[in-house]
Image: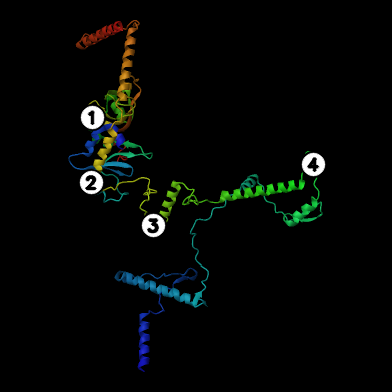
Protein backbone atom coordinates (compact mmCIF):
# COMPACT_ATOMS: atom_id res chain seq x y z
CA UNK A 1 0.00 0.00 0.00
CA UNK A 2 2.75 2.34 0.92
CA UNK A 3 4.39 1.78 -2.46
CA UNK A 4 1.48 3.17 -4.45
CA UNK A 5 0.67 5.98 -2.05
CA UNK A 6 4.30 6.79 -1.69
CA UNK A 7 4.78 7.07 -5.39
CA UNK A 8 2.00 9.63 -5.39
CA UNK A 9 3.01 11.81 -2.51
CA UNK A 10 6.53 10.85 -1.63
CA UNK A 11 8.10 11.89 1.60
CA UNK A 12 5.17 13.98 2.67
CA UNK A 13 3.22 10.89 3.57
CA UNK A 14 4.75 11.04 7.01
CA UNK A 15 2.57 14.07 7.62
CA UNK A 16 -0.41 11.73 7.57
CA UNK A 17 0.99 9.82 10.50
CA UNK A 18 2.77 12.57 12.42
CA UNK A 19 -0.24 14.72 13.04
CA UNK A 20 -0.31 17.22 15.88
CA UNK A 21 -3.90 16.43 16.81
CA UNK A 22 -3.34 12.85 17.86
CA UNK A 23 -2.36 9.41 16.73
CA UNK A 24 -3.76 8.19 13.45
CA UNK A 25 -3.44 4.73 12.06
CA UNK A 26 -4.21 2.57 9.06
CA UNK A 27 -6.22 -0.58 9.48
CA UNK A 28 -6.99 -3.39 7.08
CA UNK A 29 -10.57 -4.59 7.14
CA UNK A 30 -11.87 -7.04 4.56
CA UNK A 31 -9.27 -6.10 1.92
CA UNK A 32 -9.82 -2.37 2.36
CA UNK A 33 -7.45 0.01 4.07
CA UNK A 34 -9.01 2.61 6.35
CA UNK A 35 -7.42 5.67 7.88
CA UNK A 36 -8.71 6.68 11.27
CA UNK A 37 -7.75 8.16 14.57
CA UNK A 38 -6.69 5.80 17.31
CA UNK A 39 -9.73 6.66 19.39
CA UNK A 40 -12.04 5.76 16.55
CA UNK A 41 -10.13 2.54 16.02
CA UNK A 42 -10.68 1.51 19.62
CA UNK A 43 -14.40 2.24 19.31
CA UNK A 44 -14.55 0.10 16.20
CA UNK A 45 -13.21 -2.88 18.13
CA UNK A 46 -16.56 -3.35 19.80
CA UNK A 47 -18.18 -4.39 16.52
CA UNK A 48 -18.06 -7.90 15.11
CA UNK A 49 -16.17 -8.12 11.86
CA UNK A 50 -19.13 -9.05 9.68
CA UNK A 51 -21.15 -6.12 10.98
CA UNK A 52 -18.46 -3.47 10.42
CA UNK A 53 -18.78 -1.84 7.00
CA UNK A 54 -16.45 1.11 7.21
CA UNK A 55 -14.30 2.94 9.73
CA UNK A 56 -12.80 6.36 9.22
CA UNK A 57 -11.79 7.04 5.61
CA UNK A 58 -11.25 4.33 3.07
CA UNK A 59 -7.95 4.90 1.32
CA UNK A 60 -8.19 2.03 -1.10
CA UNK A 61 -8.41 -1.69 -1.39
CA UNK A 62 -6.28 -4.69 -2.16
CA UNK A 63 -7.35 -6.64 -5.19
CA UNK A 64 -7.46 -10.42 -5.31
CA UNK A 65 -4.01 -10.48 -6.89
CA UNK A 66 -2.51 -8.29 -4.18
CA UNK A 67 -2.42 -4.98 -6.04
CA UNK A 68 -3.49 -1.85 -4.22
CA UNK A 69 -6.08 0.46 -5.81
CA UNK A 70 -6.43 3.98 -4.43
CA UNK A 71 -9.99 5.18 -3.96
CA UNK A 72 -11.23 8.72 -4.50
CA UNK A 73 -12.09 8.98 -0.80
CA UNK A 74 -8.37 9.35 -0.11
CA UNK A 75 -8.12 12.42 -2.34
CA UNK A 76 -8.53 15.11 0.29
CA UNK A 77 -5.81 13.50 2.40
CA UNK A 78 -3.30 12.84 -0.33
CA UNK A 79 -3.84 15.81 -2.67
CA UNK A 80 -2.07 18.40 -0.50
CA UNK A 81 1.02 16.21 -0.37
CA UNK A 82 1.19 15.30 -4.02
CA UNK A 83 4.57 15.59 -5.67
CA UNK A 84 3.57 14.89 -9.25
CA UNK A 85 0.55 16.70 -10.61
CA UNK A 86 -1.30 17.04 -13.86
CA UNK A 87 -3.45 20.03 -14.74
CA UNK A 88 -6.32 19.54 -17.14
CA UNK A 89 -7.88 21.97 -19.53
CA UNK A 90 -11.53 22.79 -19.09
CA UNK A 91 -12.51 20.64 -22.07
CA UNK A 92 -10.83 17.57 -20.67
CA UNK A 93 -12.06 18.10 -17.14
CA UNK A 94 -15.59 16.83 -17.88
CA UNK A 95 -14.23 13.79 -19.68
CA UNK A 96 -12.01 12.90 -16.76
CA UNK A 97 -14.88 13.22 -14.33
CA UNK A 98 -16.86 10.78 -16.44
CA UNK A 99 -14.08 8.25 -16.05
CA UNK A 100 -12.13 8.59 -19.30
CA UNK A 101 -8.38 8.71 -19.60
CA UNK A 102 -6.53 11.98 -20.12
CA UNK A 103 -5.52 12.74 -23.71
CA UNK A 104 -2.67 14.98 -24.76
CA UNK A 105 -5.12 17.53 -26.10
CA UNK A 106 -6.55 18.00 -22.64
CA UNK A 107 -3.25 18.31 -20.84
CA UNK A 108 -2.44 21.81 -19.68
CA UNK A 109 0.52 21.29 -17.40
CA UNK A 110 2.48 18.49 -15.84
CA UNK A 111 5.17 18.63 -13.19
CA UNK A 112 8.74 18.12 -14.30
CA UNK A 113 10.47 14.78 -13.94
CA UNK A 114 7.31 12.77 -13.86
CA UNK A 115 8.36 9.21 -14.66
CA UNK A 116 6.31 6.88 -16.80
CA UNK A 117 3.52 5.10 -14.86
CA UNK A 118 4.07 7.38 -11.90
CA UNK A 119 1.07 7.99 -9.67
CA UNK A 120 -0.21 11.53 -10.14
CA UNK A 121 -2.91 13.74 -8.73
CA UNK A 122 -5.08 15.36 -11.37
CA UNK A 123 -6.10 19.00 -10.97
CA UNK A 124 -8.18 21.36 -13.01
CA UNK A 125 -7.05 24.83 -14.00
CA UNK A 126 -8.43 26.31 -10.80
CA UNK A 127 -6.22 23.99 -8.73
CA UNK A 128 -9.11 21.87 -7.53
CA UNK A 129 -8.02 18.22 -7.16
CA UNK A 130 -10.11 16.02 -9.42
CA UNK A 131 -8.72 12.61 -8.74
CA UNK A 132 -5.89 10.13 -9.09
CA UNK A 133 -4.20 8.87 -12.15
CA UNK A 134 -1.06 7.23 -13.47
CA UNK A 135 1.16 8.97 -15.97
CA UNK A 136 1.12 7.01 -19.22
CA UNK A 137 4.08 8.97 -20.56
CA UNK A 138 6.98 10.67 -18.88
CA UNK A 139 7.14 14.46 -19.03
CA UNK A 140 9.61 14.42 -21.91
CA UNK A 141 7.51 11.98 -23.92
CA UNK A 142 4.40 14.04 -23.27
CA UNK A 143 5.83 16.96 -25.20
CA UNK A 144 6.09 14.94 -28.38
CA UNK A 145 2.92 12.95 -28.26
CA UNK A 146 0.02 13.32 -30.71
CA UNK A 147 -3.03 15.15 -29.45
CA UNK A 148 -5.02 11.93 -29.27
CA UNK A 149 -2.47 9.95 -27.30
CA UNK A 150 -3.27 9.04 -23.71
CA UNK A 151 -0.96 10.81 -21.29
CA UNK A 152 -2.55 9.72 -18.01
CA UNK A 153 -4.65 6.75 -17.03
CA UNK A 154 -7.70 7.43 -14.96
CA UNK A 155 -7.77 5.69 -11.57
CA UNK A 156 -10.20 7.60 -9.39
CA UNK A 157 -12.12 10.83 -9.77
CA UNK A 158 -14.55 12.88 -7.72
CA UNK A 159 -17.32 12.15 -10.22
CA UNK A 160 -17.41 8.69 -8.62
CA UNK A 161 -19.15 10.23 -5.63
CA UNK A 162 -22.18 10.46 -7.89
CA UNK A 163 -21.58 7.62 -10.31
CA UNK A 164 -20.63 4.92 -7.82
CA UNK A 165 -22.42 6.33 -4.81
CA UNK A 166 -23.63 2.96 -3.58
CA UNK A 167 -20.32 1.16 -3.90
CA UNK A 168 -18.06 3.67 -2.17
CA UNK A 169 -17.30 2.79 1.44
CA UNK B 1 -36.37 -58.53 68.63
CA UNK B 2 -34.02 -55.56 68.80
CA UNK B 3 -31.80 -57.15 66.25
CA UNK B 4 -34.75 -57.73 63.92
CA UNK B 5 -35.80 -54.09 64.38
CA UNK B 6 -32.26 -52.94 63.71
CA UNK B 7 -32.13 -54.99 60.50
CA UNK B 8 -35.52 -53.69 59.36
CA UNK B 9 -34.58 -50.07 60.06
CA UNK B 10 -31.32 -50.65 58.16
CA UNK B 11 -33.27 -51.97 55.19
CA UNK B 12 -35.59 -48.97 55.35
CA UNK B 13 -32.69 -46.56 55.41
CA UNK B 14 -31.04 -48.28 52.49
CA UNK B 15 -34.29 -48.21 50.58
CA UNK B 16 -34.59 -44.48 51.23
CA UNK B 17 -31.15 -43.80 49.79
CA UNK B 18 -31.96 -45.54 46.56
CA UNK B 19 -34.81 -44.29 44.46
CA UNK B 20 -37.50 -46.71 43.34
CA UNK B 21 -37.10 -48.68 40.16
CA UNK B 22 -40.71 -48.05 39.10
CA UNK B 23 -41.17 -44.82 37.25
CA UNK B 24 -44.52 -43.42 36.33
CA UNK B 25 -44.78 -41.66 33.03
CA UNK B 26 -47.81 -40.23 31.28
CA UNK B 27 -46.70 -41.40 27.88
CA UNK B 28 -44.51 -44.44 27.54
CA UNK B 29 -41.03 -44.05 26.17
CA UNK B 30 -40.05 -45.24 22.71
CA UNK B 31 -37.24 -47.75 22.88
CA UNK B 32 -34.67 -48.96 20.44
CA UNK B 33 -32.80 -51.42 22.62
CA UNK B 34 -30.45 -52.42 19.83
CA UNK B 35 -29.04 -48.90 19.93
CA UNK B 36 -29.62 -48.43 23.70
CA UNK B 37 -31.89 -45.57 22.79
CA UNK B 38 -34.93 -44.35 24.68
CA UNK B 39 -36.86 -41.28 23.58
CA UNK B 40 -39.20 -39.52 25.96
CA UNK B 41 -42.14 -37.81 24.19
CA UNK B 42 -43.47 -36.33 27.45
CA UNK B 43 -43.50 -32.54 27.48
CA UNK B 44 -41.25 -30.78 29.96
CA UNK B 45 -42.72 -29.36 33.14
CA UNK B 46 -41.93 -25.68 32.65
CA UNK B 47 -42.74 -24.65 36.21
CA UNK B 48 -40.29 -27.16 37.61
CA UNK B 49 -37.81 -26.17 34.94
CA UNK B 50 -37.91 -22.53 35.92
CA UNK B 51 -37.82 -23.31 39.62
CA UNK B 52 -34.84 -25.65 39.66
CA UNK B 53 -33.46 -26.28 36.20
CA UNK B 54 -30.50 -28.52 37.01
CA UNK B 55 -32.33 -30.55 39.62
CA UNK B 56 -35.34 -31.13 37.45
CA UNK B 57 -33.27 -32.18 34.46
CA UNK B 58 -31.19 -34.52 36.60
CA UNK B 59 -34.30 -36.21 38.00
CA UNK B 60 -35.74 -36.50 34.52
CA UNK B 61 -32.55 -38.05 33.18
CA UNK B 62 -32.37 -40.47 36.10
CA UNK B 63 -35.96 -41.59 35.58
CA UNK B 64 -35.50 -42.18 31.87
CA UNK B 65 -32.27 -44.04 32.45
CA UNK B 66 -34.07 -46.22 35.01
CA UNK B 67 -36.75 -47.11 32.47
CA UNK B 68 -34.13 -47.99 29.87
CA UNK B 69 -32.31 -50.22 32.32
CA UNK B 70 -35.58 -51.88 33.29
CA UNK B 71 -36.00 -52.84 29.66
CA UNK B 72 -32.43 -54.10 29.48
CA UNK B 73 -32.96 -56.29 32.48
CA UNK B 74 -35.97 -57.86 30.81
CA UNK B 75 -33.76 -59.30 28.08
CA UNK B 76 -32.44 -62.87 28.42
CA UNK B 77 -29.09 -62.84 30.20
CA UNK B 78 -26.02 -65.02 29.95
CA UNK B 79 -23.48 -65.40 32.72
CA UNK B 80 -19.86 -66.14 31.92
CA UNK B 81 -16.93 -65.79 34.36
CA UNK B 82 -18.96 -63.78 36.88
CA UNK B 83 -19.99 -61.39 34.13
CA UNK B 84 -23.64 -61.12 33.18
CA UNK B 85 -24.17 -60.24 29.57
CA UNK B 86 -27.25 -59.57 27.55
CA UNK B 87 -27.68 -59.97 23.82
CA UNK B 88 -29.02 -56.78 22.31
CA UNK B 89 -31.58 -57.21 19.57
CA UNK B 90 -30.98 -55.75 16.12
CA UNK B 91 -31.19 -51.99 15.80
CA UNK B 92 -34.43 -50.70 14.32
CA UNK B 93 -33.39 -47.14 13.61
CA UNK B 94 -31.38 -46.60 10.44
CA UNK B 95 -28.46 -44.31 11.23
CA UNK B 96 -27.03 -42.32 8.33
CA UNK B 97 -23.53 -43.09 7.14
CA UNK B 98 -20.65 -41.75 9.16
CA UNK B 99 -18.26 -41.55 6.27
CA UNK B 100 -19.09 -40.89 2.61
CA UNK B 101 -19.94 -43.87 0.43
CA UNK B 102 -16.90 -45.55 -1.09
CA UNK B 103 -16.11 -44.46 -4.62
CA UNK B 104 -16.11 -47.17 -7.27
CA UNK B 105 -12.70 -48.66 -7.82
CA UNK B 106 -10.96 -47.24 -10.89
CA UNK B 107 -11.09 -49.59 -13.87
CA UNK B 108 -7.95 -51.36 -14.95
CA UNK B 109 -6.49 -50.61 -18.35
CA UNK B 110 -8.04 -53.71 -19.88
CA UNK B 111 -11.41 -53.01 -18.34
CA UNK B 112 -11.40 -49.50 -19.77
CA UNK B 113 -10.47 -50.83 -23.20
CA UNK B 114 -13.09 -53.54 -23.05
CA UNK B 115 -15.73 -51.02 -22.06
CA UNK B 116 -14.74 -48.72 -24.89
CA UNK B 117 -14.80 -51.52 -27.44
CA UNK B 118 -17.90 -53.15 -26.03
CA UNK B 119 -16.18 -56.45 -25.33
CA UNK B 120 -18.06 -58.52 -22.82
CA UNK B 121 -16.74 -61.41 -20.81
CA UNK B 122 -17.82 -64.79 -22.00
CA UNK B 123 -18.31 -67.28 -19.27
CA UNK B 124 -15.82 -70.00 -20.08
CA UNK B 125 -16.26 -73.53 -18.95
CA UNK B 126 -13.72 -75.18 -16.72
CA UNK B 127 -12.90 -77.90 -19.23
CA UNK B 128 -12.05 -77.65 -22.89
CA UNK B 129 -12.54 -80.31 -25.53
CA UNK B 130 -9.14 -81.16 -26.82
CA UNK B 131 -9.37 -82.52 -30.40
CA UNK B 132 -5.93 -84.12 -30.39
CA UNK B 133 -6.28 -85.93 -27.14
CA UNK B 134 -10.02 -86.43 -27.67
CA UNK B 135 -11.00 -85.78 -24.13
CA UNK B 136 -12.04 -82.98 -21.82
CA UNK B 137 -8.95 -81.18 -20.53
CA UNK B 138 -9.11 -78.57 -17.78
CA UNK B 139 -8.46 -75.04 -18.95
CA UNK B 140 -5.72 -74.47 -16.34
CA UNK B 141 -3.89 -76.31 -13.64
CA UNK B 142 -1.62 -79.34 -13.22
CA UNK B 143 -3.78 -81.59 -15.35
CA UNK B 144 -3.64 -79.07 -18.13
CA UNK B 145 0.16 -78.97 -17.92
CA UNK B 146 0.21 -82.75 -18.05
CA UNK B 147 -2.02 -82.80 -21.13
CA UNK B 148 0.24 -80.20 -22.79
CA UNK B 149 3.27 -82.36 -22.17
CA UNK B 150 1.41 -85.27 -23.74
CA UNK B 151 0.61 -83.24 -26.80
CA UNK B 152 4.06 -81.75 -27.17
CA UNK B 153 6.07 -84.89 -26.53
CA UNK B 154 8.10 -83.87 -29.58
CA UNK B 155 8.81 -80.34 -30.89
CA UNK B 156 10.09 -79.62 -34.37
CA UNK B 157 13.11 -77.43 -34.88
CA UNK B 158 12.21 -75.02 -37.71
CA UNK B 159 14.60 -74.47 -40.60
CA UNK B 160 15.70 -70.95 -39.71
CA UNK B 161 16.88 -71.89 -36.20
CA UNK B 162 20.13 -73.52 -35.14
CA UNK B 163 19.46 -77.34 -35.04
CA UNK B 164 21.01 -77.69 -31.57
CA UNK B 165 18.57 -75.43 -29.75
CA UNK B 166 16.49 -76.90 -27.02
CA UNK B 167 12.94 -76.15 -28.14
CA UNK B 168 11.47 -77.29 -24.86
CA UNK B 169 13.67 -74.90 -22.96
CA UNK B 170 12.68 -72.14 -25.34
CA UNK B 171 9.01 -72.86 -24.84
CA UNK B 172 9.46 -72.90 -21.08
CA UNK B 173 11.33 -69.58 -21.23
CA UNK B 174 8.56 -68.03 -23.30
CA UNK B 175 6.01 -69.20 -20.79
CA UNK B 176 8.01 -67.72 -17.96
CA UNK B 177 8.18 -64.41 -19.83
CA UNK B 178 4.43 -64.39 -20.35
CA UNK B 179 3.80 -65.08 -16.69
CA UNK B 180 6.22 -62.34 -15.65
CA UNK B 181 4.55 -59.86 -18.02
CA UNK B 182 1.15 -60.67 -16.62
CA UNK B 183 2.44 -60.25 -13.10
CA UNK B 184 3.97 -56.91 -13.98
CA UNK B 185 0.71 -55.66 -15.43
CA UNK B 186 -1.20 -56.83 -12.39
CA UNK B 187 1.19 -55.03 -10.07
CA UNK B 188 0.90 -51.91 -12.19
CA UNK B 189 -2.86 -52.00 -11.80
CA UNK B 190 -2.48 -52.43 -8.08
CA UNK B 191 -0.08 -49.50 -7.93
CA UNK B 192 -2.51 -47.29 -9.80
CA UNK B 193 -5.18 -47.91 -7.25
CA UNK B 194 -3.05 -47.94 -4.13
CA UNK B 195 -2.80 -44.74 -2.13
CA UNK B 196 0.69 -43.98 -0.96
CA UNK B 197 0.90 -41.75 2.08
CA UNK B 198 2.73 -38.58 1.11
CA UNK B 199 2.17 -36.56 4.23
CA UNK B 200 3.67 -37.39 7.54
CA UNK B 201 6.17 -39.97 6.37
CA UNK B 202 9.45 -40.14 8.23
CA UNK B 203 12.64 -41.46 6.63
CA UNK B 204 13.30 -45.17 7.09
CA UNK B 205 17.06 -45.05 6.98
CA UNK B 206 18.22 -42.28 9.29
CA UNK B 207 21.88 -42.55 8.31
CA UNK B 208 21.13 -41.91 4.65
CA UNK B 209 18.66 -39.03 5.13
CA UNK B 210 19.49 -35.43 4.47
CA UNK B 211 19.37 -32.71 7.11
CA UNK B 212 16.18 -31.27 5.76
CA UNK B 213 14.48 -34.69 5.88
CA UNK B 214 15.58 -35.18 9.48
CA UNK B 215 14.46 -31.73 10.62
CA UNK B 216 11.15 -32.36 8.91
CA UNK B 217 10.85 -35.70 10.70
CA UNK B 218 11.66 -34.08 14.04
CA UNK B 219 9.09 -31.35 13.47
CA UNK B 220 6.56 -33.99 12.49
CA UNK B 221 7.22 -35.95 15.66
CA UNK B 222 6.84 -32.80 17.70
CA UNK B 223 3.45 -31.94 16.32
CA UNK B 224 2.06 -35.49 16.30
CA UNK B 225 0.34 -35.02 19.61
CA UNK B 226 -3.28 -34.47 20.53
CA UNK B 227 -2.67 -30.75 20.86
CA UNK B 228 -0.66 -30.62 17.62
CA UNK B 229 2.64 -29.94 19.32
CA UNK B 230 1.55 -26.86 21.24
CA UNK B 231 2.94 -28.19 24.52
CA UNK B 232 5.80 -30.29 23.21
CA UNK B 233 9.10 -29.64 24.94
CA UNK B 234 11.76 -28.38 22.65
CA UNK B 235 15.40 -29.39 23.01
CA UNK B 236 17.77 -26.55 23.92
CA UNK B 237 19.63 -26.68 20.62
CA UNK B 238 16.64 -27.27 18.39
CA UNK B 239 15.94 -24.72 15.74
CA UNK B 240 12.64 -22.89 16.24
CA UNK B 241 10.06 -24.25 13.85
CA UNK B 242 8.22 -22.13 11.33
CA UNK B 243 4.58 -21.40 11.90
CA UNK B 244 2.82 -23.96 9.73
CA UNK B 245 -0.29 -23.24 7.78
CA UNK B 246 -0.32 -19.52 8.52
CA UNK B 247 0.10 -17.81 5.19
CA UNK B 248 -0.37 -14.25 6.40
CA UNK B 249 0.67 -12.89 9.75
CA UNK B 250 -1.28 -9.99 11.17
CA UNK B 251 -0.18 -7.86 14.07
CA UNK B 252 -2.90 -7.40 16.72
CA UNK B 253 -5.35 -4.59 15.92
CA UNK B 254 -4.90 -2.83 19.23
CA UNK B 255 -1.41 -2.61 20.51
CA UNK B 256 1.33 -0.11 20.57
CA UNK B 257 -0.03 2.49 18.15
CA UNK B 258 2.91 4.79 18.68
CA UNK B 259 5.31 1.96 17.98
CA UNK B 260 3.31 1.06 14.89
CA UNK B 261 3.53 4.65 13.60
CA UNK B 262 7.24 4.69 14.25
CA UNK B 263 7.69 1.44 12.38
CA UNK B 264 5.72 2.73 9.42
CA UNK B 265 7.76 5.91 9.24
CA UNK B 266 10.95 3.88 9.29
CA UNK B 267 9.58 1.76 6.48
CA UNK B 268 8.89 4.94 4.52
CA UNK B 269 12.43 6.09 5.02
CA UNK B 270 13.75 2.80 3.69
CA UNK B 271 11.46 3.05 0.66
CA UNK B 272 12.55 6.56 -0.17
CA UNK B 273 16.20 5.76 0.19
CA UNK B 274 18.21 5.50 -3.02
CA UNK B 275 20.03 2.29 -3.78
CA UNK B 276 23.58 1.90 -2.56
CA UNK B 277 26.01 3.27 -5.07
CA UNK B 278 23.32 4.89 -7.19
CA UNK B 279 24.80 8.32 -7.62
CA UNK B 280 23.42 9.01 -11.05
CA UNK B 281 19.78 9.89 -11.42
CA UNK B 282 19.11 7.78 -14.47
CA UNK B 283 15.83 9.46 -15.29
CA UNK B 284 17.31 12.90 -15.20
CA UNK B 285 20.19 11.76 -17.39
CA UNK B 286 17.78 10.18 -19.87
CA UNK B 287 15.65 13.31 -19.96
CA UNK B 288 18.70 15.46 -20.56
CA UNK B 289 19.76 13.25 -23.43
CA UNK B 290 16.30 13.35 -24.98
CA UNK B 291 16.21 17.13 -24.65
CA UNK B 292 19.60 17.43 -26.35
CA UNK B 293 18.50 15.19 -29.22
CA UNK B 294 15.35 17.22 -29.66
CA UNK B 295 17.36 20.42 -29.81
CA UNK B 296 19.70 18.97 -32.43
CA UNK B 297 16.78 17.78 -34.51
CA UNK B 298 15.11 21.18 -34.30
CA UNK B 299 18.35 22.91 -35.33
CA UNK B 300 18.84 20.56 -38.33
CA UNK B 301 15.26 21.21 -39.41
CA UNK B 302 15.87 24.94 -39.46
CA UNK B 303 18.96 24.45 -41.63
CA UNK B 304 16.82 23.10 -44.47
CA UNK B 305 15.39 25.89 -46.66
CA UNK B 306 11.75 26.46 -46.04
CA UNK B 307 9.63 25.56 -49.10
CA UNK B 308 7.70 28.70 -49.90
CA UNK B 309 7.13 29.77 -46.38
CA UNK B 310 3.50 30.49 -45.64
CA UNK B 311 3.09 34.04 -44.57
CA UNK B 312 1.51 34.19 -41.18
CA UNK B 313 -0.90 37.01 -40.66
CA UNK B 314 0.02 38.77 -37.44
CA UNK B 315 -2.36 41.39 -35.99
CA UNK B 316 -1.08 44.88 -35.43
CA UNK B 317 -1.41 44.76 -31.66
CA UNK B 318 0.95 44.51 -28.73
CA UNK B 319 0.66 40.72 -28.87
CA UNK B 320 1.31 40.80 -32.58
CA UNK B 321 4.48 42.84 -32.06
CA UNK B 322 5.68 40.32 -29.53
CA UNK B 323 5.04 37.49 -32.00
CA UNK B 324 6.98 39.33 -34.70
CA UNK B 325 9.90 39.82 -32.37
CA UNK B 326 9.87 36.16 -31.38
CA UNK B 327 9.87 35.01 -35.00
CA UNK B 328 12.68 37.37 -35.90
CA UNK B 329 14.69 36.19 -32.92
CA UNK B 330 14.18 32.56 -33.85
CA UNK B 331 15.16 33.16 -37.44
CA UNK B 332 18.26 35.05 -36.41
CA UNK B 333 19.26 32.38 -33.90
CA UNK B 334 18.81 29.61 -36.40
CA UNK B 335 21.05 31.19 -38.99
CA UNK B 336 23.64 32.09 -36.42
CA UNK B 337 23.56 28.59 -35.00
CA UNK B 338 24.04 27.09 -38.47
CA UNK B 339 26.94 29.40 -39.24
CA UNK B 340 28.48 28.67 -35.85
CA UNK B 341 28.46 24.90 -36.55
Q: Residues within 10 Å of mark 4 (few under 14, many from 20)?
A: few
Q: Chain of mark 4?
A: B
Name the residue beneath numbered marker 3: B227
Q: Residue furthest front?
A: B207
Instruction: For the residues labelled 4 and 3, say whether their Cβ atoms are less than 8 Å apart.
Output: no
Q: Residues within 10 Å of mark 2 (few under 14, many from 20)?
A: some
Q: CA distance from mark 4 to mark 2?
A: 103 Å
Q: Chain of mark 3?
A: B
Residue located at (33% from left, 36% from top)? A69
Instruction: Please name which of the two marks, 3 or 2, marks the residue nearer to the observer.
Output: 3
Name the residue beneath numbered marker 2: A40
Secondary structure under the numbered disc 3 in the rendered image: loop
Instruction: For the residues labelled 3 and 2, say whether their Cβ atoms are less than 8 Å apart.
Output: no
Q: CA distance from mark 1 to mark 3?
A: 60 Å
Q: Residues within 10 Å of mark 3 (few under 14, many from 20)?
A: few
Displayed quadrant of residue B26: bottom left
Q: Are marks 3 and 2 on the same chain?
A: no
Amino acid sequence: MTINCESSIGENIRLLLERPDGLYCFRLHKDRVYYMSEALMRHALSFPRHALISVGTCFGKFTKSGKFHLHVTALEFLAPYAQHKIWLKASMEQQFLYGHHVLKSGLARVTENTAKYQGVVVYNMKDVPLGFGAAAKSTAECRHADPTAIVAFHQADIGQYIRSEDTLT
Amino acid sequence: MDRALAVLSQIEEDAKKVKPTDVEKEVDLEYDIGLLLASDPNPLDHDALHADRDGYLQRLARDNCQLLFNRLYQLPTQTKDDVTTVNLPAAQLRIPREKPAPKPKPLTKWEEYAKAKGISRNKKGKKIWDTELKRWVPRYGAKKAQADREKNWVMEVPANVDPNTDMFAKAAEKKRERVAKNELQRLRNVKRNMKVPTVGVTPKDVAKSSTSELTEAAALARRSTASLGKFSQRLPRDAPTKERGKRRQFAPAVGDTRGEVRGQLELLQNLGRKEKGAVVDTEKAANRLIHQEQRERAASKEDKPKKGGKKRWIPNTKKGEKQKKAIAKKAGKGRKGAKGR
